[in-house]
Image (cartoon, grey):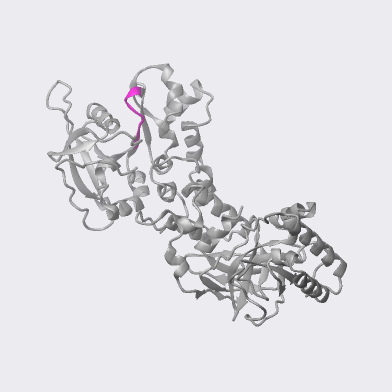
Amino acid sequence: MALEQQEYGRGVDFCYEPLKGPSDTIRLIVIEPTNSDADDPIITCSISHMRFDQRPQYEALSYMWGDEPATRRILLNGKGFLIKQHLYDALHFFRRQKPGILYWIDAICINQDDVSERNSQVRIMPHIYGRAQTVVIWLGKRYLEANRELWEPMLDDGYWQRVWIIQELGKARKIEICFSPSIRTWSDFIIQVEKDSTSTHGPMRLKSQLAAKYKDGHTLRRLLETHKDAKCKIPHDKVYGLVGLATDCRGFPVDYNKSIFEVWKDTMTWVTWNYRMSTKDTVTFGRLAKEILIESNVGITTIIPKEYHESPIRRSGDITFFGDITMEMGTISIQPYVLGQIVHLGPPPNILVDNLEETDRWMKEIQENYPINNGAANWENDQLIDAIFNTKELDLSMVSGISSRIRSRFATGFPFKTYDPYYGPKTTAKPYRTFQMHDHKGKTSDSQLCRLGIAPGEAQRGDLVCWVPNIARAILVRLMDGYAQVIGTSILAHEVFSIPEHNKLVKRFNDGDFSDSKDIRFTVDAETAYALILLV
């Protein structure tokens, strides 16, 4: 497609004239007929600029670029221009079969070395294919033979896996395909495929997609879910190749100068802005978008620029009369449930076990903080200390300070208490702290769980311990001056000593069962959202 830039046009003497005027200007080519009866190997084309208000009558080519270098020379307005063999074969075929027709072919009609032009042309790509009289599929020279043995290879051809054909054929008014041994209509071709094969992939999958053209199957979210395995050379095209077909993507920012994370960020904020997705769906979609765009082994320190972590913390959002949070572009709304509020911060886990004075001080706090269910709290504490004592090296890799760079207005029914943010000892030398918390009733529930836990060293008394559906760890949220900020992740004590009730609790939370719990609604920046979805 237009963005799979390779060596097109390099090392030759053709030079593009910039597209001038409004954004609805494109280039079109005409393949000149050969001047002799012999099959002249030199293909000559003329190229010109056309505006859509001129109502040009043209056909658009849908094909696969291929990985081979551009080595075949053609003449473009009398100047040399290099293309790949696959496209050369197509031009050679059309010179005989469809002479004198205007064609739009991305590799020739877009200056692939001009990123600004590529951006603008991709934005109007749905119009280019949608206004073409015909979209012509070129699978390759080999499929022009009248040979029934070509059916199965054709169904598995890499063309059908391209992300760009979803838009190219999805926007087409009329489709033709060059196959065995001439040009066929799409409907005749599909009838033949259904007759000769039981395959449900390749062209048959595209048939199903075309049938859903005016249904919900053409939202960006649904297209990404359906075509997550589609192929392209440039990761950006996993999204950009679909936005022109999506019914909900007018105005989506297309920019090949952006990093892959910025494309993920645009995709996430666009989808979550357009649909009031639950937090569980937001996390699920965020992971899908990451899987599509970003390699699995790329973490947050690699993908997010250093400048983000050094940027000042800013305030964002407002509360409407209905308790909803107004959002700004680049932020994502989440609605975690509050498990409790930290009422005491203890020593790091190893010191809690190794220093008996710290152990006694910690247990005295348990006695004071849980006067009603003291027995259950002491049982949980005994299990936690035993697990720490018998574990050579406790795995606390999922406990971290995320350091979100925005503080958002929030709405919650949790009756949180306001504490002096500097209350109690703070530590920078130790990365972890144990904590005790109360639920929204000012105590703990009758459950055997969720009283104690381990937090990063940045934790403070008064921080809320919250659970986000589909996230593998609780998060810490700090409330101050009417704003909420994610400040880290934590683990609950029952995760450390691994009792069966933990898995039941996690399943209940991830299924959205937060009976007798209070939620909190606020927004986070995309960088924080990305850090959270990495917690699996």
Q: Residue at x 44, y 22 (%)?
A: 151
From the viewer's side, name the closer residue of 52 and 375: 375
Is the N terminus in the top left, top right, bottom left or bottom right quadrant? top left
Magenta residues, start to end = 135-142
Residue 485, compared with residue 35, is above or below; it is below
Q: Where does the image place residue 194, in percent across and percent down from the top left?
A: 50, 25
Q: Nearer the viewer, residue 66 or 216?
A: 66
Q: Eyeballing the image, is 145 above or below 32?
A: above
Does 528 lie within the magenta span?
A: no
- Residue toward you, 436 or 50: 436
Residue at image location 49% in from the left, 74% down from the top: 313
- Apparent side of residue 265 relative to residue 47 in the rendered image (left or right): right
| Residue 106 falls left or right of residue 32 | right
Q: Is residue 65 visible?
A: yes
Count of numbered labels shown in the rendering: 0
Horizontal and vertical percent for residue 17? 17, 51
| Residue 137 is covered by the magenta coloring | yes
Q: Position of residue 377 (x, y in %)?
A: 82, 67
Q: To which quarter of the image does residue 429 belong? A: bottom right
